[in-house]
Amino acid sequence: MIPFPVQRILAQVARCRWRLALLCVVAGLTALRPVVVRAELANPAIKELASEEFEQRAAAIERLVATAEPRVALILKALIDGDLLASAEGFVYLNEGGQLVDAATGAAVPKPAAEPEVILANNALRQQAESALAALRLFAPDPEVRRAAVREFISQIAQVDAAMLPMLDRAMAAERDPEVRDALRIVQAVAAAGSPQAERRLEAVRVLGSTQLPAIRTLLAKMAGEGGDEDRRIRGAAAASLALVETRLSRGEWLGRIFAGLSLGSILMLAAIGLAITYGLLGVINMAHGEMIMIGAYATWGVQSAFRAWAPQTFDWYPLVALPAAFLAAGLLGVLLERGVIRHLYGRPLETLLATWGISLALIQAVRTLVGPQNVEIQNPTWLSGAVSIAGATLPWNRIVIIGFSLAVLLLIALLLSRTRLGLFVRGVTQNRAMASAIGVPIDRVDLLAFGLGSGVAGLAGVALSQIGNVGPDLGQSFVIDSFMVVVLGGVGQLAGTVFAGFGLGLASKFLEPSVGAVIAKILILVGIIAFIQKRPQGLFALRGRALES
Amino acid sequence: MDDALVSERPLFGRAQWLALAGLVFFAGIVVPLAHVFLPESAALRPSSYFVTLAGKFACYAMLAVAMDLIWGYAGILSLGQSLWFALGGYAFGMYLMRGIGREGQYQSELPDFMVFLNWKTLPWHWWNTDSFGWALLLVVLLPAAVAFVFGWFAFRSRIRGVYFSIITQALTYAAMLLFFRNETGFGGNNGFTDFKTLLGFRITDPAVRASLLAMTVAALACVFVGARWLVQTRFGRVLQAIRDAEGRVRFCGYDTLRYKLLIWTLAAVISGIAGALYVPQVGIINPGEMSPANSIEIAVWTAVGGRATLIGPILGAWIVNGAKSWFTMAFPEYWLFFLGALFVAVTLYLPAGIVGLWRGRAKS
């Protein structure tokens, strides 16, 4: 009897975590089926690993994996690392930190007379070995490891073929975890779809009807079509399953598009609310509005960096601090802008446009000089990472939260405008500036506060954007045009217009993009807006006024 | 003649005519001739860099005059001038690309970028672009047609003021994205470059360069004098009335749409011609020329010089571009700060621009 060199393997594998995981596989399988450990791994498959032809080596890996023996993982790992050696006589050794062991048994062997040579793996072989390793992880004792392994199979389902079927069958037979079983059943069915037994194929095709992966659609379409499966029954079943999968897939696609549209719409709305308020109130366009968004995003970055440096244990909650910080930073900047520049240009909206554009240039350059021209990296807190899967569409958490957040901001602003004294003044000045002033509304203060509020909300939009995209000095540039399109479409003076226009534009672009591409979609939307204002020059929702120049 | 009151004033005083003729003579005849006929070693020979620069600045000046016509005199701040400029440039650039013939990298009849994209034939919009006459026609008609259609829809629904500005900016931005795509057939990112011949002459020939400068100066002089004439006609007077109180003009029975549409299209055509003259001199046109930032810079030249003065915007274009050349060489970091400050300072403290400042001095 050859002693199992546990000690040596332990010493070897403890060097890296990966090997520890492998050890788990080895140990687990050893515990389950102790008899197999020293079974005939000295089979020809190992010798064939040393063969001259890459094809033969690939075949050898397949056969090794099909045995599902515990040592196979070690051998494959050694092959990938270049630690698998072969002597001239065709004996295969593992190099364990300089000590040669028999690849089949793990027993230490004396140095052979002729120096053994490393078995080289080309790219294809290495890939094969790596996916084989993933297959072996299906036998890990830890259900978490097995779940991860089966998820990996699902994500690369197109690579699964009938050769893996014995291994998958064995994994299925041993599996108790319901979650892994469910996923494994699909992988098994994909492999079984290529099985030579008609019964298994039929069963597999039926199981596949419950899935919704594009790769499975392709597989089923191939089986159902002309020249597909030889068995007519199976062709019929495949066609039926295909119909099911396609329905589910297209439903998922639609859901995905609607979600993407809502997500874009919520950002557009958030970016446009501030612009709509100030444009309605003052009749001027703040071209630096986009830069307020950028400042908000950079404030988020600052808060995030501070948390990482000084309070890493509460890092997850940095957005709660970033929100007020971004609001204040952008809002204060807005107040300064109003006091310093815009106030002096009242009644000259075109000049205001130019002046604020100049300010936006200076702000961009200031950020480039102070922080650097590259994008900064913002890490999502854990509760904003990940995604939920609903009916085949993957909905990232950060986008879901942002939709909710934008609605909350909308609600707050609606309350502010309808329930507070400031809101009353803002509405009054928007309707008729001269009259409001005449009856004693402090229009100076109203302008200032409304401008600060609009800029602050843009800062909040920056916090939201920082969670889903790149943050760089040019972040705000494209937003002025897009958010002003929302204002043009929605009309000024009414929040409802901004909301409908924001979500409408978001949905429209996400539904146009897949068929015509992003650029053409943008152009079509612009043309659509110009056509729309032929009918309704005031936008969707307009305040009725009697002034000539409105 | 009901125009009698308006056209009584001469276009320019005698001294102004003389100054103008002198400038045109110098920049359009003396400099080009000196560039061609003086020997390379002569100290007074204008270098090819200088000649190209002068041509470039004359193109910018034409752009500024066009901007002044619509913004200064009609009160329409267009942020789409760079689009017309680039359309004219691309229209003429197509002709120049065909002029490369088989001298390109791939020695194909097709422009290099099409070979690179593996296209086998010219796309439909390149039809007849090897004809010089067609190229000239396109330079005028393309910006005119796009501007006319867009303007008709925009003015008809009475889009004015900042609304109009932003929509022109959106149009320019969308067009820039379109031209950035390879599929559009205008060379994508890289645009057109590496021109070899113009009407059969080598484009690097000093005589070609000098003639281009002479033509640009002549075109600028024509545009300037023509604009001066136009704003003094009855048409120009109505335009200024529209700028100051459009509602009242409409109530007086004028169809303001026609006036605005005509000046808007004319400004687009002038910008297109400027673009067509710009491309062979500078040797490249790419979608970056259409960027919204460029359009806004044109507005700032106009504001710096002084709106509704015609001469002011020309000076503004030269001053700002001179400052830009100097800044981007001396301290590139601070150019945007300077430009931003210029936007703010001019709108806050110099509403009438440099010319206004000078006139104010002259009066007091």
Image (cartoon, rainbow, N blue to C red):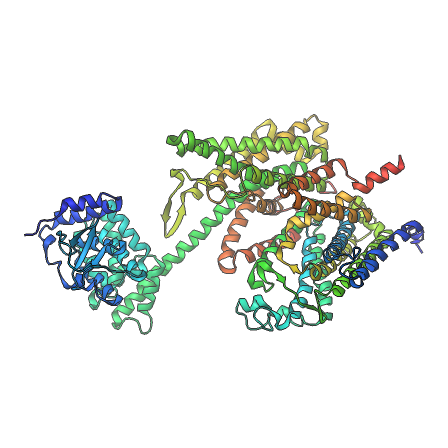
Q: Relative to A27, is A224 above or below?
A: below
Q: Quadrant of residue B290?
A: bottom right
* Residue B63 seen from this side: yes
Q: Can residue A425 be seen here?
A: no
Lateral position of residue A297 relative to residue A178, left or right? right
Which residue is more in the foreground, A60 or A283? A60
Q: Residue at x 70, y 45 (%)?
A: B326
Pick the residue in front: B320 or A13.
A13
Q: How many marks?
A: 0
Where is residue A360? Give x, y as percent. Answer: 62, 40
* Residue visible at 24% across and 67% down in the picture: A52
Give percent across and percent down for residue B286.
63, 58
User: Position of A273 compared to A384: left or right?
Assistant: right
Q: In this view, does A38 lie to the left or right of A401?
A: left
Q: Where is residue A417 in the image (x, y as percent from the top left)?
A: 58, 32
Q: Is residue A86 left or right of residue B322?
A: left
Q: In the image shown, does A148 or A85 lie closer to the viewer?
A: A85
Above-or-below relation of A487 to A215: above
Q: Residue A250: where, in percent of width, then height?
A: 40, 58
Residue lying farthest to the left in this orientation: A1
Q: Height in image: A151 above or below A90? A: above
Tell me the quadrant of the picture where the C terminus of chain B can be found.
top right
Quadrant position of the N terminus of chain B in the picture: bottom right
